[in-house]
Amino acid sequence: MTKFIITGGQELKGEIITGGAKNNAQIMIPVSLLSAATITLSNVPRIDGVEKSLELLSDLGAEIQDRGDKIQINTAKVTKAELDKKIADKFRTSIMFVGPLLARFGRVRFPHPGGCVIGAAGRPIDLFLEGFTALGATIEIKDNYYEISAKKLTGTNFFFTTATVTGTQSLIMTACLASGRTILKNCAMEPEVEALADYLNRQGAKITGAGTPTITIDGVKELGAGDCEIIPDRIEAGSFAIMAAATDSAIKISHCNPEHLLNLLAIFDKIGVKYDRGADWISIKKSRPLKAYDLKTHEYPGFSTDLQSPYVVLMTQAQGTALIQETIYDRRLIWADMLSQMGANIIMCDPHRVAVSGPTKLYGKKLISPDIRAGIALVIAALIAEGRTEIDNIYQIDRGYEKLDARLRALGAIIERSE
């Protein structure tokens, strides 16, 4: 497996550019199926989920012109409504192709989606299936495939028993071409939901309320397509901001949207992280000492579960004890044992809570990245640590952070990629 080899303790400084949002790009690719016109995506991050999404779309028959961070997609010749198992098995967001195919062709056949192991037991697709059924579709399971069909999709009232970003986005896309009005309640409020609705409205959809718990969609007969710039990745920007604070570095994070990180910035104010901000940048200053601060993850606009792992590392460098509680995914704190191996003072209170006492000195170790967000947290810990750290299975990190090693070297980090 490919690994990162990191020598910690180096001074980091300079500017790092935020890439396009993974969770926006991977949604906008299947959106292309809602129209026979050409969509042009820009600021596209070239990460694994994007590549697999393009591969799956190409298998369906779409014409794709790939120019790096700008991609043109035309689905006029798509007639296939079945997702290839070999591709769809590899990533969870293959489920996002189902709604658009159902809306366009009235039928779709697909295997259970694959992807990240974190939270897998708590991330079924039942809310997707319930939503499709509420819109008038029928569902059968044959030969380990789901087969969904609908002679006509009809607007409905639907309540999400659990707020879900991809579930909300999926039903927005599907309801756009349904007959009548759909009202979705207890919706996810993440910026990626708003970005999807904004694009679809520009193409003729009638969506109101995106970014609030209640979203209303009045179905239309057809949608156009056009230009879409992928929004900045708020998780990447937040990870880099926490990295700067944890390593006591002066780093400017550019091409980001600070409005998407207000919760993190409010906590920075409480713990003593000094920063300046502009319309599309955050500049973290050297800030010692830091104060420990308790944290509980929550759906947006609360503190993102995807920033919880880096925050645990940050608290190893703060004065006092912080209780960190994970409320979204069951298994997201198990990785903290690796920090203990590096010298961190961490007590696992239960599967959902850890107590982190600091500041503590960290030491290089041989580690294995279990998932995307724990992976970036281990990188941050390695940058702090004395000596050499090897992080194996960095495929998981590459899934969320494009060319991370090159970007960190530009800041002064000693990090190499090794087979």
Image (spheres, rainbow, N blue to C red):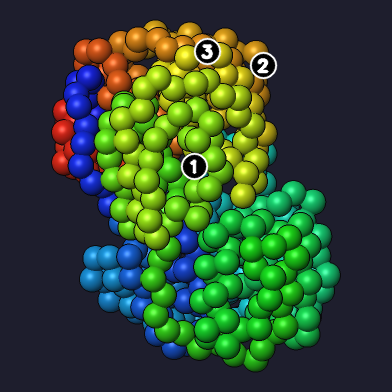
Note whether residue 55 is visible.
Answer: no
The residue under label 2 is which amino acid type? Asp
Q: Amino acid at mark 1?
A: Leu
Q: Quadrant of residue 186?
A: bottom right
CA–CA distance in space, label 3 to label 2: 20 Å
List the single residue furthest toward the bottom.
Answer: 221
Pointer 1 or 3: first along the chain: 1
Give the label on residue 265, or none.
Answer: 1
Residue ID at (39%, 71%): 229
Frontmost residue, 242 versus 72? 242
Q: Position of residue 175 (x, y in %)?
A: 69, 76
Front label number (3 vs 2): 3
What residue is shown at x 28% (from left), y 52% (from top)? 17
Is any atom of residue 44 visible in this view? yes
Disc 1, disc 3: CB below 8 Å? no
Which residue position holds label 2? 350
Q: Quadrant of residue 165?
A: bottom right
* Label 1, label 3: how far apart the Cα atoms are: 20 Å
